[in-house]
Amino acid sequence: MLVRPLLRFWPDLRSRIGVYILVLVLTLLANGIQLVVPMITGYIIDGPIAHRDLSALWLPVLGVLAIGVAEAVGMWARRMIVAPVVSGWEIMWRSRLFDRLQYTSVAIHDSWESGQLLSRAVNDLSQMRRFFAFGLPFLLSTPIVILVGTVMLSILQPVFGLIMIAMAVPTIVSVSIFERRYRETSRRSQDTIGEITTEVEESIQGIRILKSFGRSPWAAERFSLVSQKFKGLEIRKAKLDSWFWSVLLLLPTLAQAAIVGVGTWGVVQGWTTIGTVVAGVTISMVLRMPIEMLGFLLADALMSLTAATRYWEVIDIRHDITDTDGSVDDDPDVGSYRGALEFDSVDFHFADTDRLTLHGLDLRIEPGQTLALVGATGSGKTTLASLVPRLQDVTAGAVRIDGVDIRDMPVNELRHLVSVSFEDPILFSASVAENVEMGAPGSDEDEIWTALEIASAKDFVSRLPEGLGTRVGEQGLSLSGGQRQRLALARAVIGRPRILVLDDPLSAVDVDTEDRVQRALREILPDSTTLIIAHRPSTAALADVVAVLDEGRIAALGTHEQLLESSPLYRELMGASAKAEAHTTDAHSWEGGRR
C-alpha cells in the first residue's frame, strides 16, 4: 500500500488522537467557514439591495464580521494546540531512531553513509513534523471543503454544481500523473540531501588531511558535483510543481468563466437571479484557494511519504545484538567473573560478503594473562577484538568468558565486564573528566586522576588550562594523537575491567611512554585479562603470550622469544615493525630536541 509508511505512525498518534481530531475540526472550520460569505452576499443583493431596505443590512454585515473573527480564532487555536503535539511526536521519533542506531551492531555503518543517517534524523523528521502539523490537516479538510462547496453550488443552481463536477475529471488525471512522477523525484532528491550531508561531514572531519595534502579543491569539486545533482532534481521537482499548479490554476478559472457565462444567460432568460449568480461566482472564487492548495499539499504529502519510508528503513534494521532472554541489568555484578577469555572455532564474515575474515579460530587467554595479537594488515586482528564486547557477533563458533557464551550474557553486563580502547580514539565535545568518566559513570575525581596516571596522561592533563574541566573539542582535535590515545586508554581502565581489549592503543606515543603505561597496567590491574593488538616488538615483548594471526587463522602461538626462533612469519612482521619503530623513535627524539 502506497501510504503504509505513514500509517505505521498510527500507534504513536493514537495516544493524542482526541487532540488531533480537534485540530482537524478547527482546520476544517477555519478553512470552510468562508463558504458562508457568498450565501450572505447573494442574500444581500437579492434582499436589502433589491428592495432598498437598509434596515435589513446590518445583520448580514455582522454575520460576515463574525465569520472573519471565527476564522482567525480557529486558525490561532489550531496552531496553539497542534505545535506541542507534533513537536512531542518528533522528539519521540528522533529518540527511537537514535536508540536504534545505538543498540544495533556497528555493521550498520559498513553499509550506510553517516550523512544518510543524519539526514533521516534531522531533515526527514522535520518534514514529518510539518506534515502532521500543517499538511495532513489541510489535506484531509480541503477535499471536504471542495465537496461542500460543490454541494452548495448544486443547491444554489444545479447547473453550477455540474460545472464544478466537470472539472473533477481532469483534476483526478493530473493528480495521478503528478503523484507518480513527483514521488520518484522526491525520493532521489532526499537521498541526495544525505549525500550532501556526508560530503560536508567528511570534509569537516578530514579538514587537516585535506589542507595538508592541498586537496581542498578536490573536496570542493566533489561537493559541487553532488550539489549540482541536487539542483537538477530540485529543478525537475519545480517543473512538475509548475505544470501541476498551472493545471490547478486553469481549472477553477474555467469554472468561474462558465458560471459567469451560464449565470448571465440565466438572468437574461429569467430562470435565475443576479444574487444567485454573484453567490455562485463568489463560491467558485472561495473554492479556488483550496483547489490551488491541492498542488502544494500533494507535493508535501509525497515528500513526507518519502521521509517516512526513509525513516522506517532505519527503524526496520534487524536488531542483531540482543539479550537472549531479553533481560537488561542496569547494575550488573561482574565481580564473580575470573576473566578467562576463549575463542572456540570462531568463524566470521561481514554481512555484504561470504568471504570469511576469521576461519575456525581457537584461542584461550587465562585470567590475568596478557596476550599480544600480531598480524599483517587485513589479517583480522581488529575484527577479532570487536567480537569480545559484541560490537559484532560471530558467524559460527563462540566467544566465551569463564566458559559462558557471551551471547547468553546480558549485553549490559558484558560491556561492564569488558573495556575497549581503539587505535583511532574518539573523544566527545566535553571536558577531559567527562570523556574519561564515560568508562565508569559516577567515578570521583581521585579515580579519574588514577586512570589518567595509568595512561601516563596525568602530567599533560594537569597542564591544561582548566585541568580536568578543559573541553577537548570535537573528537579531541585540540589534542595531539598521542594525547587522545592516552585519554581513551584512561577511559578504558577507569572501571577496572575484568577483560581489557586494546587495539594498538599507544601507536602514537613513544616507546618509553608505552613501557610506563604497560607497567602501570600490570601493577594496578593485575587481575585483568588483556588482549592487545600489537605492531611493535616492544609491545609484544611485554605480553605473556603472543598469537600470530594470518588470513584469519592462528599461525603461531608462544612467547615473544619463542616465536622469534620458531616462526618465520613472526620474524618478518617484527623485523618490519622494528624498522618502523626505529624511525618513530628517531622522530620523537628529533621533536624532543626541537622542544
Image (cartoon, rainbow, N blue to C red):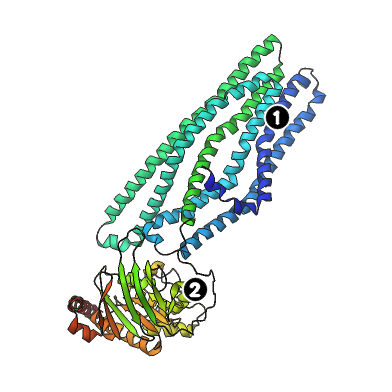
Q: Position of residue 271 (x, y in %)?
A: 71, 13
Residue 93 sits in quarter: bottom right
Is residue 465 visible in the rendered structure shown here? Answer: no
Front residue of this view, candidates 337 and 76: 337
Residue at 43% x, 77% y is: 418
Q: Residue furthest bottom?
A: 523
First along the sequence among labels 2 and 1? 1
Report the residue marked by disc 1.
37
Label 1: how many Cα within 10 Å (few below 14, some 14–19, many 20+): many
Count all numbered tags in the image, as a single digit: 2
Residue at 47% x, 65% y is: 103
Amino acid at the residue labelled 1: Val
Q: Position of residue 55 (x, y in %)?
A: 82, 25
> Label 2's element?
helix
Left or right position of 310 against 484: right
Residue 527 sits in quarter: bottom left
Label 2: how many Cα within 10 Å (few below 14, some 14–19, many 20+): some
Is 192 above or below relative to 487?
A: above
